[in-house]
Image: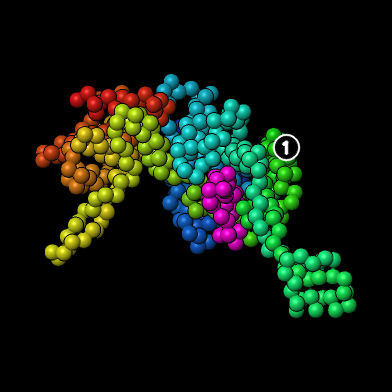
Amino acid sequence: MIKLIEVKEFDKIICNADYKYDDRYKYIEPPVFDKLKAFICGYAGSGGNADVLDFMRIGFKREAGDIITIQNYAGLIQVSENCQIQVLPKISLCNNNDDTSNRRTKRIFLNMLCSIGDFPYKTFNDASLSIDKMNLYEIFIRMYLKETRQLVKHGIKSAYTAQENNLGYCKGKLLISQHVQHNIMHKERFYVAYDEFLQDRPENRLVKATLLKLQKQTGSAENSREIRQLLAMFGMVNPSVNYQKDLSESVMDRSMKDYRILLPWSEVFLTNKGFTAFSGGKNSRALLFPMEKLYESYVAQQIKKVFVPMGWDVSIQDRGHYLFNYRNGKTCRQFGLCPDIVLQKDGHVVIMDTKWKHLEDNPRANYGIKQADMYQMYAYSKKYGTPDIWLLYPVNEEMRGKEQIFFNSGDGTYVKLHFVDLDNITDNIKELYNNLCCR
């Protein structure tokens, strides 16, 4: 059995039993804590492409000892063959109940994941996906398997593959030098080159290699049974032995649409590589997702659903303006501006920017808003020629139910704060629409 430990984003993880019941900390047993610490230190010193300290930090407090904090990333860390740490985002829930909190948070997190383009979102809506009883990694495996089942249903793609063989009959092109070398004493044989229409192509080799790897990693009997059934469908395919070569040779044309979700996830599973470019060793891996990106993508998706039917043009990651257009009297375009969301309708422009940060109810500290963020909003206002700037923060218990907060620059820029309730986001975005349209 795999031991699963659940923590939340920004939790302070300790192994000091004296603080086991202290609400400020999340206690885990020393053996697991030591493995997680070794996992972080080992990767931090390995020269990897991603800096592990960007999302996992090791600190120290005199009374509690060593502390590990996981920064604004959520997902799953496997620290050994039989121990996983599931990191859920820190989401403020209405009518919070400890018995259902993690289940609801997990479902919101998966909904957020569905908003990014390379996530197998089509399978998430399947009613048979029992997320309450499964950890995140098993859920990801289940999604991959359902997408593979869809591929099998539509038909595993074949391709003409170059073959060389010494046959008892002649087909294709006779290779003279090889024929003489191999068949000088066998007049009845022919060494030939020919094309054969086979399923053994790079895309299918990657899928089979992924299935074989997941068969060893899954702890779910249902997932294991599904993998065995799917492997039987790939009996004519050899598993990939050179992942990067097969990935580079994969073809993504119109006929290969059933592979567009599978192949990015095959790369994730096969290379122990998550969307953070963070990988683990033989018995360890991390599949972690940056919450800033997820929050931005999820909110933008929900805003499109509400605003587009109402006649608004919604541009995501708009790149139409630059901070400077001239240098030394000559035309240039430098320091591009890229607001998360730009709304336009009948000449009315509204800029929205998402920030994955929990603010505090303290006006003297500017509610915890970064000064650089305000400079950024001011630049958006001037360059896009609009006074309407919105900063979208996730709601927390400290800011829930607070009156509207806005800032006036005195020269035509108004920055308003809106707190997004991820537990009730559809109604929340509709409320945002009403605030904009009923002024």
Report x, y in % for residue 178. 76, 76
In the rendered image, residue 126 lying in the magenta stretch gets the answer no
Quadrant where the image shows the C terminus: top left
- Say which of 369 and 409 sits in front: 409
- Say which of 70 and 122 sits in front: 122
Left or right relative to 280: residue 222: right
Task: Give the crowd class for mark 1: few <14, some 14-19, many >=20 residues within 10 Å.
Answer: few
Quadrant where the image shows the N terminus: top right
**Hey, what amino acid is under mark 1?**
Arg
Judge whether residue 396 can be spotted in this image. Answer: no
Left or right relative to 127: residue 354: left
Residue at the (22%, 23%) spot, across then down: 438
- Magenta: main secondary structure: helix
Which stretch is magenta? Answer: 245-274
Q: Which residue is mark 1?
A: 225
Residue at the (69%, 34%) spot, across then down: 222
- Say which of 32 and 345 sits in front: 345
Report x, y in % for residue 393. 33, 35
Q: Is residue 210 above or below residue 366?
A: below
Report x, y in % for residue 207. 64, 49
Residue at the (60%, 40%) spot, across then down: 147
Residue at the (49%, 53%) spot, across then down: 277
In the rendered image, residue 264 lying in the magenta stretch gets the answer yes
Q: Is residue 329 above or below residue 21?
A: below
